Amino acid sequence: MPNKSFSVKIKHKIKPFSKTIKVDSDKSLSIRSFLLGSICQNISTVNNVLESGDVKSAIKTCQKLGVVIKKIRHKSYKIYGKGLGSLFIKKNAELNFGNSGTLARLLLGILSTTPNINIKIKGDHSLNKRSMEKLINLLSKFGATFLPKNKYTFPLKMISSEMPVGIKYKAGVSAQLKSAVLLAGLNSYGNTIIEEQIISRDHTENLLMKNIQSIKITKNKKKIIKVKGKSYLNPLNLNIGGDPSSAAFFAALTLLNKNSTLKIKNVGLNPTRTGFYDILKKQKVKINFKNIIKDNNEIRGDILIKSSKLKPMNVPASLYPRTTDEYLILFVLASLTNGVSTFRGISELKGKESSRAHEMKKILNQIGVKCKLSQNEMKIYGKGMIDASDKKIIVGNLGDHRVAMCAFILAILTNAKTIINNFETVFTSSPSFLKIMKLLGAKFEIQK
């Protein structure tokens, strides 16, 4: 599949299907496996890695920091860990995080407390527009310096802390900020205490749980993560499941496409990532989890989906952290369901690859679906399954993979004549997206 910029043109509605698929591997776990493997002792082995643009950026940056990473076979790697505090790069060298906010925040967490790091940092056009103010303020508490002062977007310069000391942090909805603090704490003196006020993705702490010398988690009324700095980390031996966020797009398509069934094999079902499925299961739609296993504190299994009749959704802000990447496809489902759906707690969506709720409102308006958007709430006045063959959807050069995927699904369900520019951005998270869509019977053209 091409890596250069291309557009996708759609002008046909999808027909019923009955298929079994495997989605691309989990991006969050793939990126974390290389970052953590780099600071563990000895050799870590990771299988079923997502080989996408964002993960390749993670591999390149780790190698630039002196880590030996060997590809054993397709999707399998050995990471020769250097241990905590041992990553190194020449003064004023540049690290490029590409499109990945996860890579930027987590790796800067590690580097902020690694000795003698003095680097230039940047991302692609999309990442360079995203505010890093919260991250910079947090890592500054460990003693790291970011220049120029009071600038919160890349490119920037970072100088690591000479004497990092653990901090206390009350974590909010962002798992990336929580992970950055946790990783910075691993190489700080004393203890770092993270009090989780809102449950968010827990992949980082799951992968570190076997290191009882470094991390202790207690769960009473609130989850408390205690990180003991300057301890060694054991190597990883990890098998990564399918990405639940990527799976959600195919699940949504199946639910709305008449007389269709789909089995998605070996998908990550970590409870902090299943908000999308929980929202829909409350409606008693035909979604079931089967063949569930637990490995490295991560749950995986198969997802079975059948076409179902949907009702309007009323999604509270409390579900946002567990549904971050799926809110947009829920907007698509709501637009094609009769009645008014309300989504609260969405203010963080504007800090993603694009101002996501705003972009989705523009797309839904193009097929005649009314939306009301405030800073923290989206109301969608769903019209049911409409025939939009007389309408056009045009998505500009956003560089946002989730918006592009949503527009694609909306087009093949409604028959709207559609052009999605910058579609190559989908390969940052789901390089198999178009291949799977072709297998399900979707018809589209690639325009270079």
Image (spheres, rainbow, N blue to C red):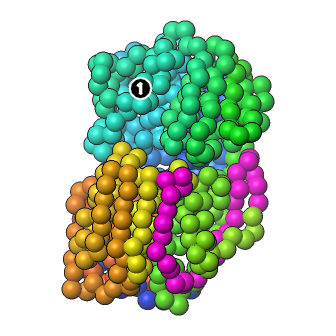
Residue at 58% x, 82% y is 306
What range is drawn magenta here? 293-319
Crowding around mark 1 (Cα neighbors within 10 Å: few <14, some 14 to 19, many 20+) is many
Residue at 38% x, 33% y is 132
Task: Using the rendered image of the protein, determine whether residue 393 is visible from the camera's viewpoint.
Answer: no
Q: Is residue 318 magenta?
A: yes
Which quadrant of the structure image shows residue 394? Answer: bottom left
- Name the residue nearer the viewer: 292 or 95: 292
Q: Is residue 184 magenta?
A: no
| Pointer 1 residue | 136
Look at the numbered disc 1 and give the secondary structure of its residue.
helix
Task: Using the rendered image of the protein, determine whether residue 130 is visible from the camera's viewpoint.
Answer: yes
Percent position (x, y) of residue 167?
A: 58, 20
Direction from residue 396 to residue 218 in the image, left or right: right
Residue at 44% x, 56% y is 344
Residue at 43% x, 73% y is 333
State the count of labels. 1
Q: Is residue 352 above or below residue 255?
A: above
Percent position (x, y) of residue 171?
A: 55, 35
Direction from residue 60 to residue 12 in the image, left or right: left
Q: Looking at this view, name the residue that lies furthest to the top.
A: 163
Percent position (x, y) of residue 69?
A: 58, 37
Q: Is residue 402 above or below residue 366?
A: above
- Name the residue nearer the viewer: 84 or 74: 84
Which quadrant of the structure image shows residue 364? Answer: bottom left
Q: Amino acid at mark 1?
A: Ile
- Which quarter of the rendered picture does the C terminus lie within? bottom left
- Which quarter of the rendered picture does the N terminus lie within? bottom left
Direction from residue 47 to residue 99 in the image, left or right: left
Q: Is residue 231 above or below residue 328?
A: above
